[in-house]
Image (cartoon, rainbow, N blue to C red):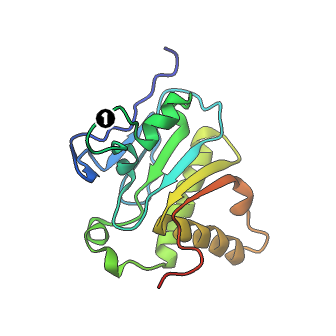
Amino acid sequence: MEGTAFGLSCGTFSYPKCGGPDFQFAGGFNPQTGFGGFGGGACRASRTPVIFIHGNGDRAINWDSPANHNKTTARSVYQEFKARGYNDCELFGITYLSLAEQRSPGGNYHNPRKYDIIIAFIEAVKNYTGKKEVDIVAHSLGVSMTLAALTYEDNLHRGGKSWAGVRRFVNIAGGIRGLP
């Protein structure tokens, strides 16, 4: 098959987390930001690239966690995109939390250093794929962190282009109206 690329692999799964390696980049894709992630490959992106941004206490490779921990036929989020025709070189994920932050989610807050990781990753994906826009699928803290990063970047640079580079934004359980 033309364009076969290195795919994300959960590795060993112990509910609720994947046990695979943190860095699963291929095909020369090296974003040089964050604490891990996945994406890249030998194929050429024909669709708008999708970037997955995890929630609090999590990491990028868990987008390949089985949808049902009883290991039924339910696909992971990543596998569902693959089943719908996306190539590995069109699917990317970033881990913006360090291992210590993953282990202690109660202390994780917004800050510009995290925004910089997310923005740098988005730009790396656009440069790698040659696409001007990306779609973003974010969960929980990843939603508010990404919304803040895009807005922060645009406000920092008058006439910024961060939001202009996002075609679709999918919010999965993001606390955008505040948290108790």
Question: Does 156 sit left or right of 33 as displayed?
Answer: right
> Against 143, is 105 above or below?
below
The mark tally for this picture is: 1
Identify which residue is drawn at 27% across, 54% down: 16
Name, please, the residue furthest toward the right.
Answer: 159
Question: Does 139 sit left or right of 22 as displayed?
Answer: right
Which type of secondary structure does the marked residue at label 1 adopt?
loop
Query: In this view of the protein, which residue sits in the foreground, 76 or 152?
Result: 76
Identify which residue is drawn at 27% across, 37% down: 71
- What's the residue type where badge 1 is placed? Thr
Q: Residues within 10 Å of mark 1 (few under 14, many from 20)?
A: few
> Residue 156 in the image: x percent, y percent?
68, 77
> Residue 110 in the image: x percent, y percent?
48, 78
> Residue 22 in the image: x percent, y percent?
30, 50
Q: Which residue is mark 1?
A: 72
Question: Does 55 sit left or right of 50 as displayed?
Answer: left
Identify which residue is drawn at 59% across, 53% down: 136
Query: In this view of the protein, which residue sits in the foreground, 160 or 53?
Result: 53
Name, please, the residue furthest toward the top.
Answer: 1
